[in-house]
Image (tube, rainbow, N blue to C red):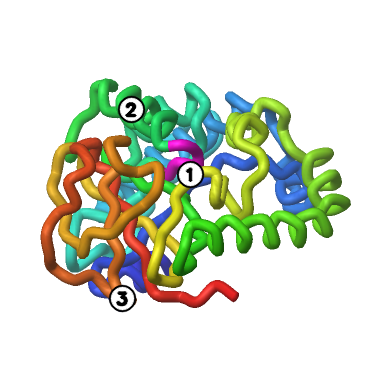
Amino acid sequence: MSSGIENISRGRFAINLVNAWNRPELDKAGIGFPEHDARYAYGREWMSVVSRLMQGERLTYKGEHFDVRDYLLRPSSLYRPRPLIYVGGESEPARALVADHGDVWFINGQPPDDVRGLIADASSRPRTGAPLRFGLSAFVVARNTDREAAEEHARLLEILKQDAPLRRQMAANTDSRAVMFQTFAQHQPHVGSNGGTAAGFTARGAAGVFLVVPVAAGRRTTGTCAKAGGASGSGIRTGVVGGEARRGNCCPHGQTGLSIVASAMPMS
């Protein structure tokens, strides 16, 4: 199915590999819930098998978790060797996995200085093939003034309190070794999934939710420059576009290889 979607979309399909943190999801599927590093070992083996199959290789493989015999996936991609593979997670096994096998590291929302350190660590690791690319989950509360943005953020935080029982239930089912939740705890409070507003960006004059466009480290990108509080000087390039990418000047905010753009989506 994924190979078919890859061709229907003309090479725009991607896989996001998450190595599980929510116990009920795996228990109810009959998979069980191995300890943290064992789940990443499973994900590493899965990726090594699936990546080769999606590149059109007829594969025979026997490992700890998978036994594949003379297996072939059709159709293969008409547009590139295989779809992009995103990898989430910030633990050491996650970093090693994305450096070895991933195309894009999807980083949870957190302050720019922390993001810059994560990118530097991943970029320093040896890998073969194309340079690793990066994406950041970063939500923006955009209003006409900083005061209006702060007031809206405060209002959303009050609404968030209504979810306290659900968050306690989720915490009870969460692997305590999942670094994602350790990161969230350091940057409370925030609104939104995967760190949401913890990245600390604000924007004036446009309503939008920031979406991620990953680019390779050191590569220039295009987009209309916009002010993003906390981003200037952080090594993160930011730009605002009206619903689709437009060519323009690259925002002069460093060369880390992380690009964040916003689409015009009202937040009310």
The residue located at (71%, 44%) in the rendering is 22
**Left or right: residue 15 compared with residue 7:** right
Q: Is residue 59 visible?
A: no
**Circle 3 sits on which residue?**
242
Residues at circles 2 and 1 in contact by the CB criterion of under 8 Å: no
**Circle 1 sits on which residue?**
199
Q: Can residue 265 be seen in this view?
A: yes
Bin the neighbour count of mark 1 within 10 Å (Cα to Cα): few under 14, some 14-19, many 20 and up: many
Q: What stretch is highlighted in magenta?
A: 106-111
**Kind of residue sitting beneath label 2:** Ala
Residue at the far right: name it.
165
Please state which of residues 242 and 123 is positioned toward the viewer in this rendering. Answer: 242
The residue located at (25%, 67%) in the rendering is 11
Residues at circles 2 and 3 in contact by the CB criterion of under 8 Å: no
Quadrant showing the N terminus: bottom left
**Kind of residue sitting beneath label 1:** Ala
Which corner quadrant of the image does residue 10 belong to? bottom left
Residues at circles 3 and 1 in contact by the CB criterion of under 8 Å: no
Please state which of residues 73 and 196 is positioned toward the viewer in this rendering. Answer: 196
Quadrant showing the C terminus: bottom right
Number of numbered discs: 3
Q: Where is residue 230 in the image (x, y as percent from the top left)?
A: 40, 42
**Kind of residue sitting beneath label 3:** Gly
Determine whether the residue tagged by mark 3 lies in a helix, strand or loop: loop
Q: Distance between the residues labelled 2 and 3?
A: 31 Å
**Circle 2 sits on which residue?**
122
Dot placed on the residue nearer the N-terminal end, 3 or 1: 1
Determine whether the residue tagged by mark 1 lies in a helix, strand or loop: helix
Dot placed on the residue nearer the N-terminal end, 2 or 1: 2
Q: Where is residue 96 in the image (x, y as percent from the top left)?
A: 40, 25
Q: Main secondary structure of the magenta part?
A: loop
